[in-house]
Image (spheres, rainbow, N blue to C red):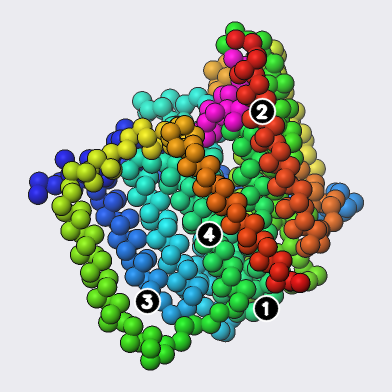
């Protein structure tokens, strides 16, 4: 019984999870592999999406040479990353130089594991398989996410330092300062949401935005974005700064710092930073969806049954369009692959109409992914339209506007909750 | 002993070894950045140990505050000062043997204390519900609200002091 002291309160699933049965272990490993594949693919096509959207904002075509609509461009980029020469500059701190991209990528990918993607489990092989890797009762969900984000600074800072070169060092310094500054505002901005939900658990935070039993179903009105609009403003601004994206991408301001902290990195080590940045964009979009936009909840009341066919309404015309579009090409890829993909998409859409169970199951992931996609679009949209801040403006914004605003939001929210408890309806 | 090797115990030993190796490496490394990195390893390993004890909240805060905020500040300052590798003087070499003696004495003292009070250490580790987020907040904001407020006041004074010192430097 000696180990009782070490594993006090043995019922905690967070720990229990590590020592699950062999079946559960296998399922978790399979889930990790699948999620990793999805995230990396989404990452690759996010670059395509970004280049296309920014190009259209600037009245250009964007990538269109490699494959139809340039759809194979990410593949070409990936191959290029693999086969480029990978020199190690003289005078670098070898260990830290290799550690930095690994750290950045590993932490960015780990943070995705905390995100839950749907409420209902899939019943497969006699097991309930939930969408998402973390255990259901991960009671420190949001804190765990912030913990991983907090460590994410090291990838950038150490890369800048280890490169033994002035521009990367300046880029690394800037980024550490920026991340320290905005982490405060980022963390404080979600406190309002936490106060309203009364939990750190991401699933419970989403459920707290669903209508209570016996209350009218208000759909989008019930989401946290309305009472927490101030918090959301702080959250999203700080999040963009935390992920080093335009208009806060000062660590890699080309005009001043070449490419910033990753100047001395080439080939796949550069790609690792790249993937890390895009993965953290996805994580932040998921987090914004969960905290403020009802996660997987539909914006419409559940009683509007017609809206349940929205996935099909989107998938079927899109699939048909892809089929038609494919025939316009004279290449094998366009003529064969695109129509095939279009047919599959159309069939999926039809399948959801025919099988109500499948349709009911995909509602939650459908809304979740739609919202995440919307946030990713906003990220790209900002990159296409906003100029970069100056460094002092950036610091002033973080410390003098966002931090006080998020503190005001916390005070206001707590006061309102207290007032409701004191004088509100029983 | 009758102490079987369960999986939690295995994880405990891995994390404990990681923490000790990190701590030793922190002292042996010549470059401040490497020392700081070792300290981060110690912090993260400790967070893992807290998690193993069921103290989820403390584990997360350990990483956010110590692993994240404080150590980032360390690394930041080292980078900003561009501190080079440590230089060994004859005095710092002389400090080695007495230091080792002190370490041995401290380790012996801690081990003796733990060995003598096996039951109470066991009790201290079994925090159960108290270590949950709710338990901690109830303790801080109900049972120990005045000490807590006093501590926060102390922190506020320290912040003001730091600000005043920084301002004086400038003018």
Residue, far left: B1
| Label pair 2/3, CB-CB below 8 angstroms | no
The front one of A417 and A335 is A417
Residue A87: x %, y % from top left: 58, 78
Q: Element type at marker 3?
A: helix
How far is the residue under mark 1 from the one under mark 3?
28 Å
Q: Which residue is mark 4?
A: B70
To the question of a shared chain for discs 1 and 3, the answer is no
Residue B34: x %, y % from top left: 46, 73
Residues shaded magenta:
A195-212
Which residue: 26% across, 45% down? A6
Crowding around mark 4 (Cα neighbors within 10 Å: few <14, some 14 to 19, many 20+) is some
Q: Which residue is mark 1?
A: A166
Which residue: 33% across, 55% down? B15
Q: Which residue is mark 3?
A: B28
The front one of B3 and B74 is B74
Q: Is residue A84 visible?
A: no
Q: Is A209 situated left or right of A252 in this image?
A: left
Mark closer to the chain start, 2 or 1: 1
| Label pair 1/3, CB-CB below 8 angstroms | no
Q: Element type at marker 2?
A: helix
Which chain is home to disc 2?
A: A
How far is the residue under mark 3 from the one under mark 4?
21 Å
Q: Point out which mark residue B130 bears.
A: none
């Amino acid at each position: 019984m000696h180990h009782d002291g070490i594993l006090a309160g043995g019922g905690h699933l967070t720990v229990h999870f590590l020592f699950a049965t062999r079946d559960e272990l296998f399922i978790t490993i399979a889930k990790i592999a699948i999620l990793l594949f999805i995230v990396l693919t989404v990452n690759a096509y996010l670059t395509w999406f970004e280049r296309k959207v920014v190009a259209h904002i600037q009245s250009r075509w964007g990538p269109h040479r490699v494959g139809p609509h340039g759809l194979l461009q990410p593949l070409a980029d990936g191959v290029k990353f693999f086969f480029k020469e990978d020199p190690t500059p003289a005078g670098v701190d070898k260990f830290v130089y290799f550690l930095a991209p690994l750290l950045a990528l590993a932490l960015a990918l780990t943070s995705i594991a905390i995100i839950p993607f749907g409420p209902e489990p899939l019943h497969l092989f006699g097991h309930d398989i939930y969408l998402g890797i973390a255990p259901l009762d991960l009671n420190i969900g949001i804190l765990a996410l912030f913990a991983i984000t907090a460590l994410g600074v090291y990838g950038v800072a150490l890369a800048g330092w280890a490169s033994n070169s002035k521009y990367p060092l300046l880029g690394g310094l800037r980024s550490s300062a920026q991340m320290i500054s905005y982490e405060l505002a980022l963390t404080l901005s979600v406190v309002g949401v936490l106060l309203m939900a009364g939990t750190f658990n991401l699933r419970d935070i989403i459920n707290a935005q669903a209508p209570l039993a016996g209350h009218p179903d208000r759909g989008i009105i019930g989401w946290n974005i309305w009472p927490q609009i101030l918090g959301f403003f702080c959250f999203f601004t700080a999040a963009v700064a935390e992920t080093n994206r335009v208009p806060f991408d000062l660590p890699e301001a080309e005009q001043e710092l070449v490419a910033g902290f990753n100047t001395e990195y080439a080939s796949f080590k550069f790609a690792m930073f790249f993937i890390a940045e895009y993965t953290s964009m996805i994580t932040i979009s998921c987090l914004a969806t969960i905290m403020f936009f009802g996660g997987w909840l539909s914006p419409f009341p559940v009683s509007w049954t017609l809206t349940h066919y929205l996935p099909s309404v989107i998938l079927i015309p899109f699939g048909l369009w892809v089929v038609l579009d494919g025939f316009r090409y004279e290449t094998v890829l366009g003529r064969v692959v695109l129509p095939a993909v279009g047919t599959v998409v159309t069939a999926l859409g039809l399948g959801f109409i025919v099988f109500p169970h499948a349709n009911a199951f995909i509602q939650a992931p459908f809304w979740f992914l739609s919202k995440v996609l919307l946030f990713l679009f906003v990220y790209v949209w900002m990159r296409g339209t906003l100029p970069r801040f100056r460094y002092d403006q950036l610091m002033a914004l973080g410390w003098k506007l966002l931090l006080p605003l998020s503190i005001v939001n916390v005070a206001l929210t707590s006061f309102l909750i207290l007032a409701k408890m004191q004088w509100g309806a029983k | 002993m009758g102490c079987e090797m369960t999986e939690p115990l295995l994880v405990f030993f891995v994390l404990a070894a990681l923490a000790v190796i990190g701590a030793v490496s922190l002292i042996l490394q010549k470059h401040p950045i490497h020392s700081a990195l070792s300290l981060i390893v110690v912090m993260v390993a400790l967070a893992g140990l807290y998690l193993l004890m069921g103290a989820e909240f403390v584990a997360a805060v350990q990483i956010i505050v110590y692993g994240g905020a404080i150590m980032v500040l360390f690394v930041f300052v080292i980078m900003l000062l561009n501190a080079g590798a440590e230089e060994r003087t004859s005095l710092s070499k002389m400090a080695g043997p007495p230091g080792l003696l002190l370490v041995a004495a401290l380790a012996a003292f801690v081990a003796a204390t733990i060995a003598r009070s096996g039951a109470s250490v066991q009790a201290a580790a079994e925090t159960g519900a108290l270590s949950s987020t709710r338990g901690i907040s109830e303790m801080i904001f109900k049972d120990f609200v005045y000490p807590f407020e006093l501590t926060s006041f102390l922190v506020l004074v320290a912040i003001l002091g730091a600000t005043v010192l920084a301002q004086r430097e400038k003018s």
